[in-house]
Amino acid sequence: MSWHGSRAYQPDWSPTSRLLAMMRTGQGPDGEPEFVYVAANAHWEGHAVELPALPDGHRWHLFADTSAASPDDVSFPGREPLLDDDSSATVPGRASVVLVGRRPENRD
């Protein structure tokens, strides 16, 4: 597990920090590497976060966004939409996001 802040691998442990993220690296059900990134924003304003780089062929997918209305706040496992940008994401105010890093599946 690794800790992050607005910048990847650089958590802000100061008493004024309002954003904290963590990434767990493990193995998915298919044996492929899988990455789970959770960012929590306690501030009322949205904050951009720099995402950790993933290995070749892996992409960040949005699993959950607590600021979205149901049923759009969570995705069905394996059907998470790809992020437009794998290098950064915005965490809305007073919300958390959960990203999953894995290889995109072919959905022909």
Image (spheres, helix red, strand yellow):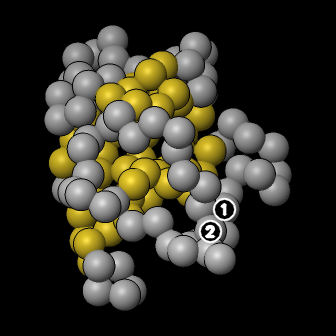
Which residue is rendered at x = 56% and y = 19% of the image? 46
| Residue ranking furthest to the right | 70
Q: Amino acid at mark 2?
A: Arg
The picture places residue 85, in percent across and down from the top left corner, at: 45, 36
Q: Is residue 59 above or below residue 5?
A: below
Which disc number belongs to residue 79? Answer: 2
Q: Is residue 42 left or right of residue 25?
A: right
Residue in the image at 38% along x and 65% along y: 102
Q: Which residue is mark 1?
A: 75
Residue 51 point in image, percent of width and height: 33, 37
Residue 19 sits above or below residue 59 on the image: above
Q: Amino acid under label 1?
A: Ser
**The C terminus lies in quadrant:** bottom right
Circle 1 SS class: loop
> Which quadrant, please, contains the N terminus?
bottom left
| Residue sitting nearer the eye, 106 or 73 | 106
Q: Would residue 54 appear left or right of 63 to someone viewing this image?
A: left
Q: Judge whether 31 appears above or below 89 on screen.
A: below
Q: Position of residue 96 (x, y in %)?
A: 54, 40
> Which secondary structure, mark 2?
loop
Q: Is residue 93 left or right of residue 4?
A: right
Q: Residue at x 51, y 27 (%)?
A: 90
* Contact flag, marks 1 and 2 (Cβ < 8 Å): yes
Residue 35 in view of the camera: no
Q: Residue at x 31, y 61 (%)?
A: 57
In the rendered structure, the answer to whether residue 1 lies left or right of residue 105 reads: left
Q: Nearer the viewer, residue 19 or 60?
A: 60
